[in-house]
Image: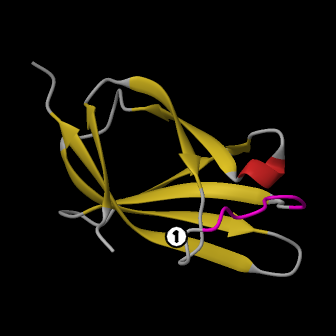
């Protein structure tokens, strides 16, 4: 499966919505989820940043939102993952790449 690529620009302030699916393409039911996090790691210096997300109602639609504020984020490429925590398990979605372009 190809990586999901996100392209933003340094200084962007944006809310992005994701629909979370399992490996078979089925929507993940987020009922009872205690937290959803978006983590991104700079390829160059290894710095990890974590954003807390919001589950969109109804949780059975598998939608989450994350608000990005890239005011102080360096341009470059970042490895990313979405971590879903419930009382009984932690699921991690990988294969996400964030490209932050320099502001013109």
**Please, which residue is most extreme toward the top here?**
104
Instruction: State the image coordinates of residue 4 (x, y, percent, origin top left).
Output: 34, 58
Are there few (<14), some (14-19), or many (20+) residues within 10 Å of tag 1?
some
**Picture quarter containing residue 6?**
top left
Looking at the image, is 14 positioned above or below residue 27?
above
Residue nearest the observer in this picture, 60 or 47: 60
Nearer-the-camera pick, 12 or 31: 31
Tally of numbered tags:
1
Which contiguous range is marked in magenta? 26-32
Residue furthest to the left: 104
For label 1, the residue is 93
Which residue is at a point 71% across and 77% down the rendered structure image?
90
Instruction: State the quadrant of the C terminus.
Output: top left
Up-down: is 68 above or below 62?
Answer: above
The residue sitting at 16% across, 36% down in the picture is 101
- SS class, disc 1: strand
Q: Is residue 51 above or below residue 45?
A: above
Indicate yes or no whether the magenta region holds residue 104. Answer: no
The residue at 83%/61% (across/down) is 33
Q: Left of 76 or right of it: where is 90?
A: right
Image point (75%, 39%), residue name: 56
89 vs 82, left or right, is right
Among the 4 quarters of the image, the one containing residue 44: bottom left
């Amino acid at each position: 499966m190809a990586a999901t690529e996100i392209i933003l620009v340094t200084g962007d302030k944006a809310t992005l919505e994701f629909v979370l699916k399992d490996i078979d393409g089925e929507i993940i039911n987020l009922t009872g989820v205690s937290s959803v996090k978006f983590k991104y790691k700079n390829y160059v210096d290894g710095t990890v940043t974590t954003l807390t997300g919001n589950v969109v109602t109804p949780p059975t639609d598998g939608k989450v939102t994350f608000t990005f504020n890239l005011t102080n984020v360096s341009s470059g490429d970042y490895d990313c993952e979405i971590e879903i925590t419930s009382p009984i398990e932690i699921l991690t979605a990988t294969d996400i790449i964030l490209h932050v372009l320099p502001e013109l």
